[in-house]
Image (tube, rainbow, N blue to C red):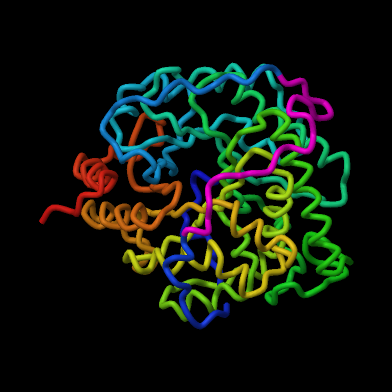
Amino acid sequence: MNDDSLSRSGRPRTMESVASRWIAAALALAALAVAAMNVWPAGRSPGLDVGPVVEHVPAGTAPGPASGAPRLIKYGQDIPSPRQVAAAADRYDALPFDGIVMRTTESAEIFSARRVDHDELLEKVSALPMGLRMQDNWLRITLHDELDWSDDALWRTVARNAGTMARALRESGRPYNGIWFDNEWYGEGRSPWDYGGTTRAWTPSDAGGATPGLSPAEAAQLVRSRGTEVMAAMTAGWPDLEVMVLFGPWVSEPSTYRALSDAGLPYNDISWVNELAGPFFLGMVERRGRAEVIDGGEFYDARSRSDYAAFADWQRRGFVLAGSRSVPTGQTDDYLRDVPAALAVYDRDQLDDYRVHDAATLGELTRFALAEATGYVWLYTEEHEWGASRSMKPPVPQEYVDAVAAARVGEAPRP
């Protein structure tokens, strides 16, 4: 199914064990700076020729959050191409966001056996205006094809494609932060994240799942190596890019369900179909060099600031300290210190039959998320067209724009 016709209602959700919330001071552990340097030469990777780094143009001066405050990103089913943003730049720049997620046809082809053409992609991403007010922009990747983790030739192509996207974004000189990796499985057939093919996490199988015949340790190591391979190509194409991965390693942990339940947060356990997402994420983290791999924090059921704080604490450190298959003991300190985390807001209420939030509620949720975030908050919308993407959705009412704009500068909803 095309992911733009897919409601987030089709997405199962995850989580299991930690009886108490972590103290508020621990939230600072999700540091945003990555200290390590690239292991490979910054300008080279097999099959990739990398040109000089082009710096972003300075950010605009439109009213917005204070310097150092979390940045607000727009994502949704009304996702535009760079060319569509260029054609309606004034309209997009009037929106209360610091950046927007875009797509091209290549977005669905990176994780496939089809080779992405650098020149074609560079032409598309270069359509984004240089002087756009929104400076924190992203190009999306989605997963649709079945992936054989043992196929070296396939993964050479995937890595090359990922490197091509990173390189094209950098060479464009346009205001992109990096790659938006929506790592939910949108394809049909076998999900690449499902280890064993059963409803019990990490249950070995000789025939089912994405890695038949491999033990949990063998499967995790193989998938982690593929994450390393892909990230190596990305950083060769753009050493300083950011990669936003919407579901972090906590989605792979059976302990997440109990932990969030104990914190009063509703969440369905989907660790049993996502065991391998965590190891892939950690492989990317291991090879990030100067780049940042960000846990996108796709969790939509927070309804108060304390809810966001509880989720963020588990996301940033709780699942690691509780014992994680994805984060080996020797990498715990590095993960806690150097892996940033984002928070998400959704314009529908998953707890009330996916009813659309009214403007005041959406603004309030956005304000709560921004208050607890350390780097990014992203707003995922399905109901309205906020820009000019030709989504065929009704135009967003001004009251929604105003509510999000107020939240962005920390104002409480007006009565």
Q: Quadrant of the C terminus?
A: bottom left
Give the residue displayed 83% in from the left and 67% down from the top.
Answer: 217
User: Residue at position x 48%, y 73% from top?
Assistant: 22
Q: Nearer the viewer, residue 395 or 117?
A: 117
Percent across and percent down for residue 117 are 71, 22
**Magenta span has 33?**
yes
Residue bounds of the magenta highlight: 28-50
- Where, by quadrant of the figure, is residue 112 drawn? top right
Q: Is residue 114 above or below residue 194?
A: above
Instruction: Provide residue 24's location: percent of width, then percent of height.
Output: 42, 67
Residue 89 at what x, y percent from top left? 36, 22
**Residue 16 image position (x, y, % from top left):** 57, 77
Magenta stretch prevailing secondary structure = loop
- In which quadrant of the rendered view does residue 385 lie? top left
Q: Is residue 280 visible?
A: yes
Closer-to-camera residue (331/245): 331
